[in-house]
């Protein structure tokens, strides 16, 4: 018999009552030979009823549900999810449906075939569909990616992409400290220092507008800039 690989899907959620059920159902619909999925949702002290949906509507579906005692940010929610995950591989899935679970095979195959230890998604690589939204967000992402690449000496096209997969032992071997959106540049900086095998694959992107609930803003961009400098230059 072939060994089944367990993959933990880490879903940090904050005020995503409109999409959390759809995201979880989309994850449940994914089928891959030789792979079983564990769904881990960490609610970051939502105030819109996200936790009620998780407990009442999704209680029999989620493998693990945790709620933060206070709002601490995406990075903190991911750290908590990582603590309780049991899979050999972890994959980060945002709760807002900007990234599609149907593309898990692209993210997971390089790790499952022992070609990669880390696989990072990219909204700018390949020809996958992506919603046209904010020009200056794109410019900011590319500038942050360029600066990150200069300091890590790896050639990513989209450091800020939220779709990322890791061998669990690799991700647990680094000390993550960023609580909010600084998680993305921090984790890239720290896995780059490990000299592990990093792959990048193009993913689709269904970006939201601010009216639809998009949360990242200019302040987060400055935090990402600080995180790039801190975690690449200071350790």
Image: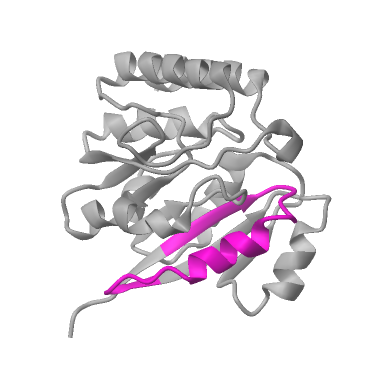
Q: Which residue corresponds to the image point at 37% horizontal and 57% vertical from the top-left? A: 104
Q: Which residue corresponds to the image point at 62% horizontal and 62% vertical from the top-left? A: 22
Quadrant into which the N terminus falls: bottom left
Left or right of 92, for residue 67: right
Residue 158 rendering spot, x and y as whole percentages: 39, 29
Residue 154 rendering spot, x and y as whole percentages: 25, 24
The answer to whether residue 158 is above or below residue 85 is above
Using the rendered view, name the quadrant where residue 151 is placed. Answer: top left
The answer to whether residue 155 is above or below residue 171 is above
Left or right of 197, for residue 165: right
Q: Which residues are magenta?
A: 8-36
The answer to whether residue 18 is above or below residue 71 is below
Q: Is residue 17 magenta?
A: yes
Is residue 123 at least partly visible in the picture? yes
Residue 184 rendering spot, x and y as whole percentages: 47, 33
Quadrant into which the C terminus falls: top left
How many numbered markers are drawn? 0
- Which of the pair 70/217 is nearer the observer? 217
Q: Hey, which residue is sitting farthest bottom in the picture?
A: 1
Q: Is residue 2 magenta?
A: no
Using the rendered view, name the quadrant where residue 149 is placed. Answer: top left
Residue 25 rendering spot, x and y as whole percentages: 57, 68
Is residue 227 at least partly visible in the picture? no
Q: Which residue corresponds to the image point at 45% horizontal and 27% vertical from the top-left? A: 185
Asked which colour scheme the image uses, the reply is one colour
- Which of the pair 164/207 is nearer the observer? 207
Q: Which residue corresponds to the image point at 28% horizontal and 29% vertical from the top-left? A: 193
């Amino acid at each position: 018999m072939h060994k089944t690989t367990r993959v933990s899907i880490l879903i940090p959620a904050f005020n995503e009552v409109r999409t959390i059920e759809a995201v979880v159902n989309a994850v449940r619909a994914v089928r891959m030979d030789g792979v079983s999925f564990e769904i881990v949702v960490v609610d970051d002290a939502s105030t819109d009823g996200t936790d009620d949906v998780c407990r009442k509507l999704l209680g029999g579906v989620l493998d693990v549900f945790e709620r933060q005692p206070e709002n601490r940010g995406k990075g903190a929610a991911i750290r908590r999810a990582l603590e309780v995950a049991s899979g050999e591989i972890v994959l980060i899935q945002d709760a807002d449906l900007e990234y599609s679970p149907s593309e898990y095979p692209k993210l997971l195959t390089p790790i499952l075939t022992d070609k990669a230890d880390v696989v990072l998604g990219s909204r700018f690589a390949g020809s996958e569909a992506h919603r046209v939204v904010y020009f200056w967000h794109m410019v900011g992402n590319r500038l942050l990616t360029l600066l990150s690449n200069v300091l890590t000496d790896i050639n990513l096209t989209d450091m800020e992409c939220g779709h990322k997969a890791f061998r669990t032992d690799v991700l647990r071997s680094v000390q993550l400290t960023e609580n909010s959106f600084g998680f993305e540049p921090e984790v890239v900086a720290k896995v780059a220092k490990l000299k592990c095998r990093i792959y990048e694959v193009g993913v689709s992107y269904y970006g939201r507008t601010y009216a639809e609930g998009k949360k990242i803003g200019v302040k987060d961009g400055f935090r990402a800039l600080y995180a790039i400098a801190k975690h690449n230059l200071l350790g």
